[in-house]
Image (cartoon, coloured by chain):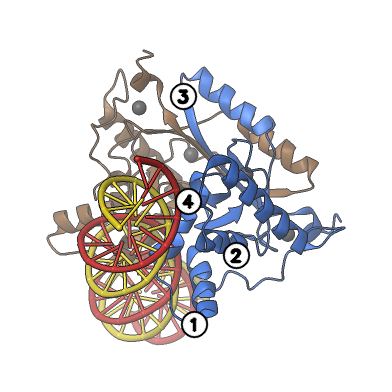
Chain colours: A brown, B blue, C red, D yellow
Amino acid sequence: MSKNISPPAAPCPHHGHQACIEQALATAVELCNRGGLRLTPIRKRVLELVWQSHQPLGAYDILAQLSAEDGRPAAPPTVYRALDFLLDNGLIHRLASLNAFIGCDRPHQAHQGHFLICRLCKVARELPHDAIDEAVEQTAAELGFLVEQQVVEVSGVCAPCRGHA
Amino acid sequence: MSKNISPPAAPCPHHGHQACIEQALATAVELCNRGGLRLTPIRKRVLELVWQSHQPLGAYDILAQLSAEDGRPAAPPTVYRALDFLLDNGLIHRLASLNAFIGCDRPHQAHQGHFLICRLCKVARELPHDAIDEAVEQTAAELGFLVEQQVVEVSGVCAPCRGHA
DNA sequence: TCAAAAGTTGTTATATAATAACGTTTCGAT
DNA sequence: ATCGAAACGTTATTATATAACAACTTTTGA
Ligand SMILES: [Zn+2]
Ligand SMILES: [Zn+2]
Ligand SMILES: [Zn+2]
Ligand SMILES: [Zn+2]
């Protein structure tokens, strides 16, 4: 069951999506260089595949693409280990409600993953605002709860799919 | 791998957890009667198992308990069909970040599931309608996004586990 | 320089979560 | 009593993720 049935995202006005990919890879290279992290060919290729669109991608979709381009079939740990590295270093996020992964466009800055996910075009947009973050922290604080991780995944219909611009 | 390794929740001061279970079942019976819904023995039993603690429970944990008490092994669809019924009618919630299910204590009122999940005692506490919901709606509205479903699952350490009685 | 240590990848097998498909039974309304 | 829909039993399969261990590579520190 491929996750890419729907039409590709209508993303990236003004520059086209290739620019997103290149920007993300360049940022990743720089971040890994600074941090002494090894962005190996497999890891870089997986990151590139995750960034192929703004639609979250399943691990087995990545696996299938790796297998296709390598000729030989890749095994799940190959992909999951690369995904773990990218997750650990903030280069991608995992969307629990979709069992899927998506690139992060501000990996330098530590943050929680907050997403709007369109049910129609499947595009997931990461929210930069901290209004939600503050509401979570405040609600938790009132109950004496120490927040360590926030999973905020909002599903619905995005503005373009609603015809709003 | 059982999900109930950790000590049972320290729940339900003043009345003990049995009261939670009975209350939840009574509410479910009443809600189903009003709505012409069939709370069959299997569905009721699954709801009761979900309510056995305030810790989210996996479908296969439920399955194992059903199998044990029936003598014969139950099959996954038995549990998943019951869970689907309970989900559809707001009697339980699914926690995407845990692949687990938990009883809802206000099934009459339509609402999104917002949870604080303690990493130590595993107790998941549902948050009443509040600032988080508003922050999500407002942030989405600014982007022209129509919200249909909210997944808000906050992990961390609860007040009792922090010693904040 | 070279060997030990740590990190990365290959490979096989398995664990865990959820659904498909289809026949049978039960329920509720005529 | 009969019919149709809903619920359930059963078998098989799909989807997602991890365990375990061997082989290879890079880094580190004599
Ligand atoms: Zn991000
Ligand atoms: Zn859309
Ligand atoms: Zn609820
Ligand atoms: Zn706790």
Q: Which mark is residue B49?
A: 2
Look at mark 4 in the image and give the residue it sits on. Answer: B85
- For marks 2 and 4 on the same chain, the one whose residue lies earlier in the sequence: 2
In the image, is residue A30 above or below residue A165?
below
- Chain letter of the residue carrying label 4: B
Mark 1 surroundings: few (<14), some (14-19) or many (≥20) residues within 10 A:
few
Same-chain status of marks 1 and 4: yes
**Picture residue at 33% right of the left edge, 66% below the top:** A77
Look at mark 3 in the image and give the residue it sits on. Answer: B146
Tell me the distance, in whole angstroms, between the alpha carbons under discs 2 and 3.
35 Å
Same-chain status of marks 2 and 4: yes
Mark 2 surroundings: few (<14), some (14-19) or many (≥20) residues within 10 A:
some
Name which residue type carries label 2.
Leu
The front one of B11 and A2 is B11
Residue C7, position as x, y percentages in the image: 43, 66
Tell me the distance, in whole angstroms, between the alpha carbons under discs 4 and 3.
26 Å
The front one of A50 and A124 is A124
In the image, is residue A69 above or below residue A50?
below
Q: Quadrant of ligand 2?
A: top left
- Mark 4 or mark 3, whichever is nearer to me: 4
Name which residue type carries label 1.
Gly
